[in-house]
Each structure stands twice: as C-alpha cells, then as structure tokens.
Image (tube, rainbow, N blue to C red):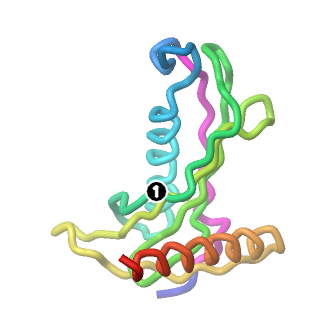
Amino acid sequence: MQPVPMSASLTLFDGEVTKADLNAHGVMHGGRLMTICDEVGYLAACKHCGGHGLTRAAHRLRFHAPMHAGDPFSVETQVTMTTRTTMWVSCVISSHTKPVMDAVFVYVAINRNFQPVEVPELFAKTDAEMEKAAEIKALYSAVMSSEKVK
C-alpha cells in the first residue's frame, strides 16, 4: 500500500443551525455537534482508506462557544494519524471564523464482513500538518497509556 498525504483526506462541510438543533437553553446541542463531527469525520476516513469504517472512539471533545438558530458553521476534518487498522481524524467546527468545537474521532477500517483491514500509512507535507500529527500522536500515547492502567 502506498502512503497517502494527509491533505488527501481533507473534508469540508458547511451548514446552518436550525431550531431542531437547539437544546433547552436555545443553543446548539452538544450531541448534535458531536454527530456532525462523526459524520464528516467518517467521510475523511473513507477517503483515506478507500473503503468503509466504523467509529471506534471519540477523544478530546472540547466545546468553545455556543451557536444559535441561523448561525452558519463550517466543519473541517482530516486524517491526522493512522495505526495498522485505524484512522485518527481531527475535526474542527467554526462559526463566524471562531472555533465552536474540536474533537478527535477514531475509525477502524472494515471489510464486508465487518473485519478490520489495514489502512495506508499517512504522511505530512507541511509544517502545519507535521504539528497536527505530533499533537495527535501525543494524544494517542496518552490514550494508550491510560488504557494500559485499567
């Protein structure tokens, strides 16, 4: 399998907050933001592996600002790290150029029988991509360390 550039998985989505997205406080429900990240992140993972995957985990979900009905938002997802069968996808949601939420989702590539399959290695081309990859590798190390403790 040939290594794939990080930029090849970049996936963008634009939307607008609707009344159905609001929670009891009149702001966009955090669960809806998580769902949007998961759905757009899945598309980035599929671009990278050339097949299908399943959500394995969500890490470091951070909410930065509320959004209200009618607010436009942009979603940017990108595979930022891979293991043998998984893809770690960074997601950032912004509104009016301000960050609203960021998270990292992990997807496992699967075949038709829902068995894990190998994914292409990933490489960064730019300084910004290398910085993002280092950040996600640090998160990966922290997650793996905490899982070994259990």
Q: Position of residue 134 (x, y in %)?
A: 70, 77
Q: Nearer the viewer, residue 146 or 58?
A: 146
Amino acid type, callout 1: Ala
Q: Position of residue 16 (x, y in %)?
A: 60, 23
Q: Position of residue 120 (x, y in %)?
A: 48, 81
Farthest bottom residue in view: 1
Q: Nearer the viewer, residue 24 or 8?
A: 24
Residue wearing tag 1: 58
Is 69 covered by the magenta stretch?
no
The residue depicted at 51 percent of the width and 12 percent of the height is 19
Q: Which residues are magenta?
A: 4-18
Q: Nearer the viewer, residue 35 or 48?
A: 35
Q: Is residue 16 above or below residue 144?
A: above
With 81 as the anchor, is 32 left or right in this view? left
Farthest right residue in view: 127
The residue depicted at 75 percent of the width and 76 percent of the height is 130
With 13 as the anchor, is 113 left or right in this view? left
